[in-house]
Structure formats: structure tokens, C-alpha cells
Amino acid sequence: SAVISQKPSRDICQRGTSLTIQCQVDSQVTMMFWYRQQPGQSLTLIATANQGSEATYESGFVIDKFPISRPNLTFSTLTVSNMSPEDSSIYLCSVEEGQYGYTFGSGTRLTVV
Amino acid sequence: GQQVMQIPQYQHVQEGEDFTTYCNSSTTLSNIQWYKQRPGGHPVFLIQLVKSGEVKKQKRLTFQFGEAKKNSSLHITATQTTDVGTYFCAGSGGSNYKLTFGKGTLLTVNP
């Protein structure tokens, strides 16, 4: 299965600032997915990132708040902009691998103070 | 939109007891997947079920997909402390490749 390197693994940020999370995959993939997991909760899809086109955002998530880049088939970034304490969460990238399900990065644990 | 309900939310067992978590979708699914997330970790894929009535086994874990492809279960026989974690079901429906996750069942095992 694919190996995903995600960083940073954790960060503590001041409100009003922005954080960019990076995911590097060891193989070329068409779609990459970004999820948010609030403490003790399930995973919520933020957006789907395709190479060469704008990301597709789910209801409740907007590009101005969560801009995504997908410059090539192995890399993507998610930025959490103008952060507030409500953005404190774990952010995960993932790729789909057919019958082998989804492979997730190790996650970024974000605390906004 | 598609909703996936999962129960129970928590389950505490003695080591050696069995454990089952149940998943129910509001719509017919094309497939259902199961993931395990250890405390502090990220979700790890366990299995995918595609066919109506399908049953798959992985050692002490048994996965079932309902006949109507709207429900699923994960059963663990004789739990061990290494089984501790949150088990999520996740379904996708029709031409929609997106996964909808259940809320998960947190399993704790008392040695």
C-alpha cells in the first residue's frame, strides 16, 4: 500500500494565524482526500484534491478557510486559515487504494490558543 | 445525504470476551469498509465488503455485510488487549466514491 508522509505531526498555533499541512505520497495518485477528526469524534471529509483542478469542498467547508494545493500527483497541502480555537482538531490526508481501502497519513494534531 | 450510524459508542469488555459493533446506513451501499484506530494513531484499513450477504474473516475478526447492503457488523472473538481502539465503519454508495464514516465504537479491554 501507499506510504504517506504527513507533517507537521502536531502544532500549537495562535488564533488568527494560518498553518499549512503537507502530505507526500510515495506513489502517484489521482485523488487525495483531506479529513478532519475532532477529539473523540469521527472523520469528516473536508475536500477532495485532484491534480490540475480546483479542490472539491464538502458542505460546511470553504476554500477561503481551507485552501488546498495539488501541484503534482504525489503531493498536496491543506492550509487552515485565520485559525480559531474551534479549528483545534486532527487533520488527516488520505488516498484511495481500491480493494485495499483508504490509506491515511499519520495526522496533524492542531491546537489553537 | 448518506448517513452511517454505528453502535455502540463505547464497549468495555474483559479480556477473552467477545465484542460486536454494528453499522447501519440510511441508503444502499456499494461497499462498506472497516477501520481500526489505536489511541493516538490514525485509521488503518481492515477490510472491504462488496457483495450482498458477504462474510469475511481475519483471524478472530468476522465481518458481515447485510443482504440489503445497508448494514454491517464486526465481531471479535475472545478479545485481547491488543484489540483496544476505535473501530469505524465507512460506506460509499452508488457512483459516489466518497466514504461516509460512522461515529465509531471505542473498545477497551480489561486484562
Image (cartoon, coloured by chain):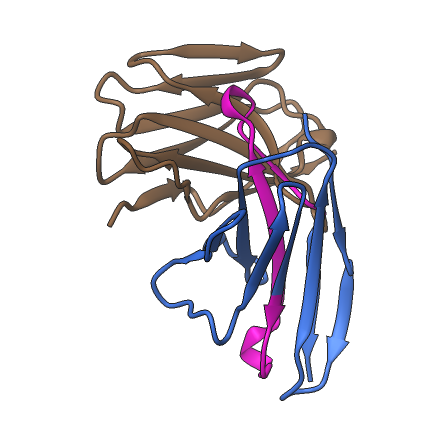
Chain colours: A blue, B brown
- Please say whether residue A21 is one of the residues in the magenta stretch: no
**Residue drawn at x 59%, y 62% as measured from the top left:** A39
Residue B1 picture location, percent across and down:
24, 50
| Residue B38 in which image quadrant | top right
**Residue drawn at x 28%, y 32% as measured from the top left:** B95
Residue B43 picture location, percent across and down:
61, 41
The answer to whether A20 appears left or right of B92 in the picture is right
**Residue drawn at x 57%, y 38% as measured from the top left:** A95
| Residue B99 in which image quadrant | top left
| Residue B96 in which image quadrant | top left
Q: Would you place residue B83 above or below residue A43 in this image?
A: above
The answer to whether A78 appears left or right of A13 in the picture is left
B78 or A8, nearer to the observer: A8
- Please say whether residue A103 is one of the residues in the magenta stretch: yes
* Quadrant (top left/top right/bottom left/bottom right) for the C terminus of chain B: top right
**Count of picture labels:** 0
Q: Magenta segment, which residues?
A: A79-106
Residue A4 picture location, percent across and down:
72, 41
Residue A36 picture location, percent across and down:
54, 58
Q: Would you place residue B76 above or below residue A30 in this image?
A: above
Q: Residue lying at the far front in this picture: please name it.
A: A52
The answer to whether B107 appears left or right of A9 in the picture is left
**Residue drawn at x 46%, y 57% as measured from the top left:** A54
